[in-house]
Image: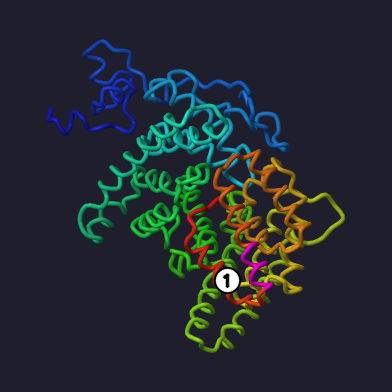
Amino acid sequence: MTSEERFSRSRNGCLQCRRKHYKCDEKQPLCSFCSSRGLDCQYPSGLRWVRQTRPMLSRHRPRSIRHRDDGELPRSSPSVLLSDLFRSDEDKLAWEYYVRLVSSNIPALDGPNNPYRQLSFTALSSPVLLETIVCIATEHMLNFGLVDVSTAARHQQRMLRTIGHNLQLIESGDAIETRAIVRANNPDHEALFAAVILQGVIVAQSADGVLEPHVRCAAFLMDILDHFRRVPQNILGRTTVQRFAMVDVMLAISRQRRPFSPRDFVLHLPDAETWDHTEPSFHKMTGCPQPLMCLLVRISHLACDVDDRLERCAQINDLLTQAYNLENDLRAWGSSHQGLIAEERIRAPLDILTECFYWTAHLLLARRVFQDHTRSPRVQHLTRTCFDLMDQLTTGVGPDSSLPQPFYLAAREAITMEDRAWVQEKHESMMNYYREQQRNLAMQLTQRIWDIGDEQFRNGNTVDSDRLIQRLDREACLFIF
């Protein structure tokens, strides 16, 4: 047996071979390696499945709409021999913490089919994904005082080394060679892509995280894996591509630039039947229906077109015509979306969150495309509409975990002491519950924008105010989603 064969790992091999880094021949019931050494040969499929106990939430408050077992491990979760799959008991505890608690906060709507909880079990056979899950958990635990800084830093360094090593394996050679290597639906490459796009969850937890390099890397993998044209239909692939699409457009809006995705990205074509009404649902995962996300993409590009023209002192009449058409499309979608139709009934939190995204789209259209100033009647009406809706989302209700982007985009438009006091109170409530450190950075930026707006208004320079705010946005590193 050559050195290369001996240390090549088998994805479906027995646990003994995995621990010793031998290539298992996968014979049943005993592989050759275990048989020749009299070892107890056990395969992952031989794990016993039992129901787990409810997690100890300690300082954590459960989501108020979570039912019975939503906070528990699925009944089909492995219990016996899990320790054999982890480097240490510390890693195992972090993985369990992610399954029981953190995974419920990533999608807008938690439930028994939450793909972010399901991918934690996929991670048991993927080192790069497992390192990412453990790192996400330890960063979350750090914010609740459950681990120290050195522990979180150690896990993050280990995860980044693993991701870097995996990227090197597919980046050798030119672009043609790279595409030839990865276009074989290799599950290791899909796991790597998932690990990269999940960096946003880690970045949101820390006060010094920067997301742009990770999203650029994810865009590179999207291109190499051909996911801009064809989205995989397995749960892991579809979930991560959908997350990339939403993060890409919201990050672009936050930075006042264009998305990294090409304009012909398949997810930029509105198709609710394909993306919202099948699992995993784009709407349930992000809080924003897929057709509405497509409208946000159009707003992002049109805002950049307007900005480019204004910098050259060129006419924007044709762009304003496009803007009116876009506004009509936005209103047409809003009038047809069932969750936005006013009825005499108690509305689901997910529907309220959806309407927050909808009115935020109107707000972006007014501010960045039509160039309305903050104190205009239309902008203030849209801002208060957003605030009234957001006030209906009780902190910890579930979908409010996906509220930060609409919230901080609307918050910067507050001009009265009453509205600003409400923004501060809502921010503190969400911060105390979710503990994502980037929320504090977002609030600090909001307060700087208030100060700039107030000063420029006193001086009568609303145009200069918008330019200063744009510069702040483009220089910022914060992002939460």
Query: Residue 355 placed where, x, y %?
Result: 71, 59
> Which residue occupies 51% across, 88% down?
314
- Residue 415 horizontal side relative to residue 70, left or right: right
- Residue 181 horizontal side relative to residue 152, left or right: left
Query: Residue 359 placed where, x, y %?
Result: 70, 64
Name the element at disc 1.
helix
Query: Residue 446 placed where, x, y %?
Result: 62, 57
Q: Quadrant of residue 122?
A: top left
The residue identified by callout 1 is 299
Query: Residue 128 placed where, x, y %?
Result: 37, 38
Q: Where 448 sits versus 196, above or below?
A: below
Colour approach in the figure: rainbow
Q: Is residue 321 found inside the magenta-colored segment of the image?
A: no
- Residue 408 horizontal side relative to residue 312, left or right: right
Q: Nearer the viewer, residue 137 or 173?
A: 137
> Which residue occupies 61% across, 85% down?
321
Q: Where 364 sits versus 21, above or below?
A: below
> Which residue occupies 73% across, 60% down?
386
Q: Nearer the viewer, residue 359 or 416?
A: 416
Classify the position of the N terminus by image quarter. Answer: top left
Q: Nearer the viewer, residue 296 or 267?
A: 296
Counting other residues with Cα less than 10 Å from the Cα at mark 1, is it few (<14), some (14-19), or many (20 or more)?
A: many
Q: Quadrant of residue 437?
A: top right
Q: Is residue 481 visible?
A: no
Given the current orientation, which residue lies at the most extreme top position? 38
Q: Main secondary structure of the magenta part?
A: helix
> Which residue occupies 33% across, 57% down?
224
Residues drawn in magenta: 451-458
Q: Is residue 470 visible?
A: yes
Q: Nearer the viewer, residue 25 or 154?
A: 154
Residue type indicated by callout 1: Ile
